[in-house]
């Protein structure tokens, strides 16, 4: 304890003398960024080490060293558990001087970090979590939600499928809050677009065998089977749907939360024809291709997911804001991030809204057939681009308390 | 029959129970208390509170396994359900933290009574399996019941004011509250172990048929220790919910039941202080190995295997053998 | 149209059949557990991990060595069974003189290690394993579309379960085994190598789990956690059936699969707990399990 405070005093003293020597203009800022995500569980492939790679690339591209800003990146595994996430976040903020936490997949963990970041007055840039509550009921002045949310997924996939003629829906819903929310949101979209929901079944979470639920969906006469579940449940339900000849029978599968790595795990034979919504795909344009190539070289040849892309863009925007402010005061940086337009090679131009929602295009993709796929990771075909004003929940509907 | 119960055990219990605790136990308790009081000024209080909560959980579990001879593989059910109840009471009803914790403990005790009365019908491995299955039922209930918040858990639980007066918001204030609870819990467990009741338990553990033939109502004793253990595990869980301002599915999942077995085994089952040490080691390990992801489970597995094969007395057990004193 | 409790009978038949398919896995796994328990008196917590290993080894054989599904069906149980033999010789055999609970704790630790290692190496998203081409497609049974592969799962597991039952109840080896379960010392005195019998039995039980794993690979995703939750359900199946009878564990496995399948139709939310509820009821009424001998 004593040694620590002595050291602190020494550092402060040297810092003081340093600034006095260099004058006011040279403000050496040291920033510590924590990448908190799943490194061993179900979301390890779509976030995990890849997100750390992405964060490092952002620091590189920002050219932090030339600007007199030192950036340190730390990472940890929250195992998708809110209690572990909150313990690590607390410790990072209290003990290790972390200024900003990023990524945090799994809604429950993200909400926990959201609360602690607010309490400790730091910055939280979420990329991995789905819950739209982060910019809704639970919104915080210290949080930016970058990549996607349940509302955008439901609207992207739901709206497009009805437009394409999928009027009658049947939901296969994971029986917990996330699944219910996804089903509710999508139902609203489907009904608003003139479709109808002919039935739904709630499966236990986590589940392994979905055949009996799929059979119920099959006999319901629906055009579209909406999968309101995630991770392993989605993979298994898609796999078994293909086995029971559901897609061959003329029913379409709509994955409400499917990532590139899920499609990779399923293989195109099984996943072909699946319709899904994402905000990033490596093969969108020259910029994304060039960046993704660099990413793959640094990450065992795996292409980035939208979550990892979001970490890159979020960290970059954060560092840009620090540069513009000339310091890392959380409130000033947050204000700057919301004021400055965002611009990065992955998501193009966008902005951060008052409630913390990052606004950008969403894209509706269809998974290619094995014949259409020309190269490894060549999985998606772009079906439609959803502009920001249609993709995201309007500010007024979110119910964020501090937005007037 | 019932009368002999009261007379028989007290005869050979007196040396320990009447004179209070042996001197070296007293010294250890005082040492622990001192460590506990100095701790937050040296180490991160939230980390220490986590150790404290798990130490109480492990000691409660050890009461059942080490002294009752009953291996429950579903103790997460009591730990977790108490944490849900106390979190809900503190958040939704705005109860003071001490009341919320009491309520959580009571809920765990009730659950222990229901499950325990069924589970003690079986012995040994069956007992372990049955408790595990009950814990799974509690898990599925927690996933689906509306008040638990599903996989989000109950978040941002207020730490509140003790008795409506003392603000528990700052980590250090809360720390001393938690220290008092855990220390109190430990003393209760110590008292139970060294009471006539505890002596009978040990007799049942060592030779159940003999205890039956001596006229003890074995099942009543088993149920009583089961409920006590569940309640104390609940006390730990309820306190944890207030500390971390969160109750989540982790607390009721079966891996939590496995962890508490690991802590007890590593520290030394059937010793008074072993589970404390085991909990401290495991929590510290989880804390510092968090970066290594899956390696945490692998290392835990290795500790399990090594403890079972080579190290069955646990850390404190070995120490006690070395010192030739029960610890 | 004629309906039963609001469900058309065709749909009900379909669900019964699906329940039977899931029951096949329960039966295979609980059979392995029951055999191991019978002779070794330990609850093999590693069983779920060994089931997972079965699926993974099948995947490895295919992707590294090009060995197809049919060969894997024979090879994998042998390979994983041998790994089980090694585990039994090196580790489990040291615990026989102790309380059975130590066996449970040891195998629990082993399960953690095995699952962790696979998770480190292969991630968790799961690996694809195609249905063998001979069994792709399906039959339209009128009341449902039955994928050929699912039909095969029922047949294969029934054959294996009954063959196991036959070996144990009707052959000389089985007689030794049953005798050793009753009284190992006496059987040893007759000149039978009981420790070796125990090792073989463990290897065989593990092989059954691996066989179930290969059967599961094409329909469930091959991932390191696939056995972790299943094993607890199988434990409940074993408790319901009672450890006493081989046939009991087979019948209970299939039966509970069907009951679970029906729950999925009438009360889907409850399908995850129904087995545990049944277990509680059975324990209340008949503590030794449906087919168990009262101890």
Image (spheres, coloured by chain):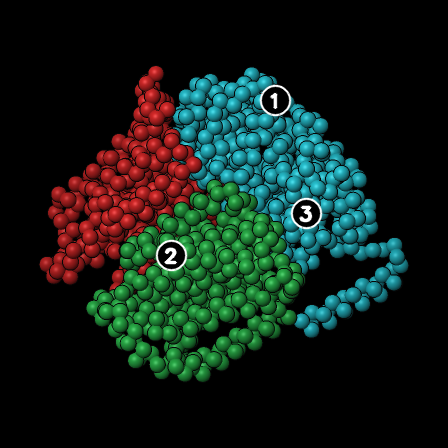
Q: Name the residue: 12% across, 60% down.
A: C186
Q: Chain of mark 3?
A: A
Mark toward the viewer: 3 or 1 = 1
Question: Is C112 above or below relative to A139?
Answer: below
Disc 3 + disc 1, Cβ < 8 Å: no
The answer for which chain carries disc 2 is: B
Q: Residue at x 70, y 37 (%)?
A: A358
Task: Give the label, 2 or 1, closer to the camera.
Answer: 2
What residue sits right under mark 3 in the picture?
A: A124
Secondary structure of the residue carrying numbered label 2: helix
Image position of B140 (left or right of A325): left
Whether residue A58 appears in this view of the structure is no
- Rendered red, the chain in question is C
* In the depicted structure, whether residue C92 falls above or below residue A259: below
Chain letter matching colour cyan: A
Q: Which residue is mark 2?
A: B113
A398 or B46, nearer to the observer: A398
Q: Is residue B16 above or below residue B245?
A: below
Q: Circle 2: is it few (<14), some (14-19), or many (20+) Cα within 10 Å? A: some
């Amino acid at each position: 304890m004593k040694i620590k405070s002595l050291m602190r005093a020494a550092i402060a003293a040297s810092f003081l003398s340093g600034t006095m020597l260099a004058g006011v203009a040279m403000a050496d800022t040291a920033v510590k960024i924590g990448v908190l995500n799943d490194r061993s569980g179900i979301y390890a492939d779509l976030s995990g080490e890849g997100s750390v790679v992405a964060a490092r690339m952002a620091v590189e591209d920002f050219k932090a060293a030339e600007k007199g800003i030192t950036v340190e990146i730390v990472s940890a595994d929250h195992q998708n558990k809110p209690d572990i996430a909150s313990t690590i976040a607390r410790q990072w903020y209290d003990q290790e001087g972390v200024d900003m936490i990023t990524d945090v997949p799994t809604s429950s963990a993200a909400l926990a970090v959201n609360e602690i970041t607010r309490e400790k007055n730091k910055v939280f840039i979420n990329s991995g979590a789905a819950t739209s509550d982060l910019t809704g009921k639970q919104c915080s002045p210290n949080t930016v939600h970058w990549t996607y949310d349940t509302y955008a997924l439901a609207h992207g996939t739901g709206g497009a499928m009805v437009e394409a003629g999928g009027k009658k829906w049947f939901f296969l819903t994971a029986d917990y809050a996330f699944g219910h929310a996804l089903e509710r949101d999508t139902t609203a979209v489907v009904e608003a677009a003139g479709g109808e929901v002919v039935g739904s079944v709630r499966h236990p979470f986590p589940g392994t065998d979905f055949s009996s639920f799929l059979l119920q969906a099959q006999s319901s006469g629906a055009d579209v089977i909406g999968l309101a579940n995630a991770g392993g449940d989605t993979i298994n339900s898609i796999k078994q749907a293909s086995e029971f000849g559901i897609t061959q029978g003329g029913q379409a599968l709509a994955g409400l939360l499917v990532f590139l790595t899920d499609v990779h795990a399923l293989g195109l034979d099984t996943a072909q024809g699946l319709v899904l919504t994402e905000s990033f795909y490596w093969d969108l344009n020259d910029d994304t291709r060039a960046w993704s190539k660099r990413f793959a070289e640094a990450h065992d040849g795996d292409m980035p997911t939208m979550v990892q892309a979001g970490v890159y863009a979020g960290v970059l925007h954060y560092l840009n804001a620090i540069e513009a402010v000339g310091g890392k005061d959380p409130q000033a940086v947050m204000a700057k991030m919301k004021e400055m337009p965002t611009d990065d090679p992955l998501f193009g131009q966008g902005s951060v809204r008052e409630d913390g929602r990052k606004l950008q295009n969403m894209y509706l993709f269809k998974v290619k057939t094995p014949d259409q796929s020309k190269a490894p990771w060549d999985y998606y075909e772009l079906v439609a681009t959803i502009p920001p004003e249609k993709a995201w929940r309007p500010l007024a509907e979110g119910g964020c308390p501090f937005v007037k | 029959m019932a009368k002999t119960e009261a007379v028989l055990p007290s005869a050979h219990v007196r040396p320990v129970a009447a004179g209070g605790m042996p001197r070296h136990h007293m010294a250890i308790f005082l040492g622990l208390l001192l460590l506990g009081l100095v701790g937050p000024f040296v180490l991160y209080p939230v980390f220490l509170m986590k150790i404290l909560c798990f130490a109480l959980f492990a000691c409660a579990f050890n009461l059942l396994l080490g002294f009752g001879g009953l291996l429950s593989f579903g103790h997460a059910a009591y730990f977790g359900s108490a944490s849900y109840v106390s979190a809900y009471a503190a958040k939704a009803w705005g109860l003071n933290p001490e009341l919320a914790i009491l309520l959580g403990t009571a809920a765990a005790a009730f659950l222990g009574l229901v499950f325990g009365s069924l589970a003690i019908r079986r012995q040994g491995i069956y007992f372990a399996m049955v408790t595990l299955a009950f814990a799974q039922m509690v898990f599925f209930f927690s996933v689906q019941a509306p008040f638990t918040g599903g996989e989000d858990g109950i978040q941002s639980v207020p730490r509140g004011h003790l008795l409506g007066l003392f603000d528990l918001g700052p980590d250090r204030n809360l720390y001393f509250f938690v220290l008092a609870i855990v220390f109190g819990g430990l003393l209760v467990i110590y008292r139970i172990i060294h009471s006539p009741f505890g002596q009978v338990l040990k007799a049942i553990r060592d030779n159940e048929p003999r205890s039956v033939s001596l006229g003890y109502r074995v099942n009543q004793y088993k149920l009583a220790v089961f409920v006590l253990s569940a309640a104390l595990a609940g006390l730990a869980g309820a306190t944890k919910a207030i500390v971390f301002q969160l109750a989540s599915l982790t607390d009721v999942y079966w891996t939590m039941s496995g962890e508490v077995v690991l802590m007890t085994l590593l520290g030394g089952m059937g010793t008074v202080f072993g589970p404390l040490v085991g909990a401290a080691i495991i929590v510290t390990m989880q804390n510092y190995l968090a970066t290594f992801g899956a390696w945490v489970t692998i290392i835990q597995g290795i500790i399990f295997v090594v403890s079972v094969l080579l190290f069955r007395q646990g850390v404190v057990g070995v120490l006690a053998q070395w010192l030739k004193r029960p610890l | 149209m004629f309906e039963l409790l609001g469900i058309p009978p065709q749909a009900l038949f379909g669900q019964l059949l699906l329940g039977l398919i899931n029951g096949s896995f329960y039966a295979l796994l609980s059979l392995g557990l029951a055999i191991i328990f019978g002779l070794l008196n330990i609850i093999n917590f590693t069983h779920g991990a060994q089931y997972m290993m079965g699926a993974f080894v099948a995947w490895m054989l295919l992707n590294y060595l090009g060995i197809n599904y049919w060969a894997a069906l024979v090879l994998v149980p042998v390979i994983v069974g041998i790994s089980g033999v090694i585990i039994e010789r090196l580790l489990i055999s040291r615990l026989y003189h102790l309380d059975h609970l130590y066996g449970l704790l040891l195998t629990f630790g082993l399960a953690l290690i095995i699952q962790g290692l696979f998770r480190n190496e292969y991630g968790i998203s799961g690996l694809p394993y195609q249905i063998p081409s001979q069994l792709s497609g399906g039959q339209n049974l009128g009341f449902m579309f039955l994928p050929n592969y699912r039909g095969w799962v029922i047949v294969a597991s029934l054959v294996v379960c009954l063959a196991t039952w036959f070996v144990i109840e009707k052959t000389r080896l089985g007689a030794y085994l049953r005798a050793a379960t009753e009284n190992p010392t006496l059987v040893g005195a007759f000149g039978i190598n009981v420790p070796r019998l125990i090792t073989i039995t463990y290897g065989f039980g593990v092989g059954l789990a691996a066989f179930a794993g290969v059967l599961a690979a094409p329909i469930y995703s091959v991932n390191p956690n696939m056995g972790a939750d299943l094993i607890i359900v199988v434990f409940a199946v074993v408790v319901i059936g009672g450890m006493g009878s081989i046939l009991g564990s087979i019948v209970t496995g299939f039966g509970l699969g069907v009951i679970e399948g029906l729950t999925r139709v009438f009360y889907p939310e409850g399908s995850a707990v129904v087995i545990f509820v049944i277990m509680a009821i059975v324990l209340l009424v008949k503590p030794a399990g449906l087919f168990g001998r009262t101890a």
